[in-house]
Amino acid sequence: MNKRSDNWALATKLVREGTMRSQFGETSEAMYLTSGYAYDNAEQAAARMAGDEDGYVYSRYGNPTNQMLAERLTALEGAETCRITASGMGAISSAMIAPCSAGDRVVAANALFGSCRHICSTILPRYGVETEFVNGNDLDAWKRALSKPTRLVLIESPSNPLLEAVDIAAVAELAHAAGALLVVDNVFATPILQKPLELGADIAVYSATKHMDGQGRVLLGAILGQSEFIEEHIDPWLRHTGPAASPFNAWVVLKGLETLDLRVRQACSNAAQIADAIADHPNIQAVRYPGRSDHPDYAVHKKQMAAGGTLIAFSVKGARAEAFKVLNSLELVDISNNLGDTKSLACHPCSTTHRALSEEEQAEMGLDESWIRLSVGLEDAGDLSADLLQALSAL
Ligand SMILES: *Cc1c(COP(=O)(O)O)cnc(C)c1O
């Protein structure tokens, strides 16, 4: 029998929820590396394929290891159900494309992960879906954009890279009044710090590649929401287009979830210390950390996020040359566009993650060449602060 209780606290669910023991009684979750399944007889094969009998038929449709992960994520998020995908973009592209038809309208926040923005700006319009971008922290802009019937709204909070806040509850209300479903990319906040579905969102999407694995090993994604929506729109899309997750990768993320709460809380504590340590350095122009009261969106972050998160953005005095000099002077922190890892990673968004945006689009987001994004990991906070301070002093 698998142990299960609706009363378990988060830390218990992260370790236990969804575990499905085989007849061998293994303590760790089993990895079912199989593409297909055999049946007892032809009648059973027919019943399974017709959906009249529960059970697995093919790993593009479902797999026991993937199912364990989906159940653990469902409990963690407080959702009705979950589907996992080969990558975060597999989840987000499915959630955005599957429910839309030609003639539909999508409204999205300006500041999005690059590939999410590409789906809205370039892919959806090619199939006759009109998209409009608004500044995520401007509620009047949301009101104007959502005064017309809309199918989907996509936001990220905190946003990439300047960690702006979108008021999830307020945008959910406006989206629903426009007949739209609100999709929240909750990667930066993690389900430990922010619960989009409780705040009124309809669908939460994740790159589990980030904090959930959190150790730089595998790609994986997840879509969470109501069963009716997932079964009607997401299941046929996933089955017939095939962004199925590898059971090996799902197993790695299951093990990652066991320590997610510990890792995220420690990384948040490190990030808060580092943000304070660098804020007054003479070569710093601005620090944006959602947990600091000088963040322009501090009030909204505080309302919907339990801590400041694991990412910091800072602007150095100067432009590209000065930002590059600081990055190149780092001795402990790596230069990488990845994030949510145990290893601290820094990047220059204008020339890497956000280089596809025009200068005007970057300026609209408040982004310029002086900004560096730092993903804080689990090294000692004192060592990390010392590395950043020596790199800033190299200017
Ligand atoms: C990384 C990331 C994605 C994409 O996830 P992959 O697993 O790399 O496909 C989407 N949104 C955000 C905010 C991300 O950080």
Image (tube, rainbow, N blue to C red):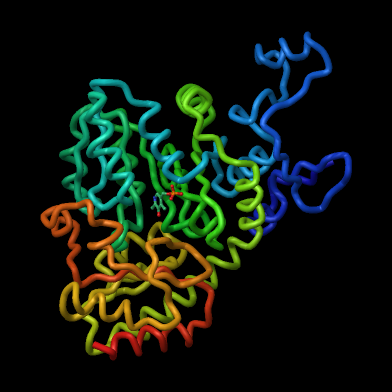
Q: Which residue is painted at 33% across and 85% down in the image? A: 391
Q: Looking at the picture, does residue 247 appear above or below residue 363?
A: above
Q: Position of residue 32 (x, y in %)?
A: 72, 40
Q: Position of residue 83 (x, y in %)?
A: 55, 36
Report the front residue among 288 and 124.
Answer: 124
At horizontal 37% and vertical 83% (from top left) the residue drawn is: 388
Residue 64, image x and y in percent? 70, 36
Q: Which residue is more in the foreground, 231 or 331?
A: 331
Query: Who's the residue at 54% across and 29% down the image?
Result: 227
Rendered-image quadrant of the C terminus:
bottom left
Q: Is residue 119 left or right of residue 237?
A: left
Q: Is residue 4 above or below residue 44?
A: below
Give the vertical position of 40 relative to 35 (above or below).
above
Left of 94 or right of it: where is 85? right
In which quadrant of the rendered view does residue 276 lie?
bottom left
Report which quarter residue 34 is drawn in: top right
Residue 161 pos. (x, y %) = 30, 61
Looking at the image, the residue that sits furthest to the right is: 24
What residue lies at 59% left-to-right and 49% top-to-bottom?
Answer: 76
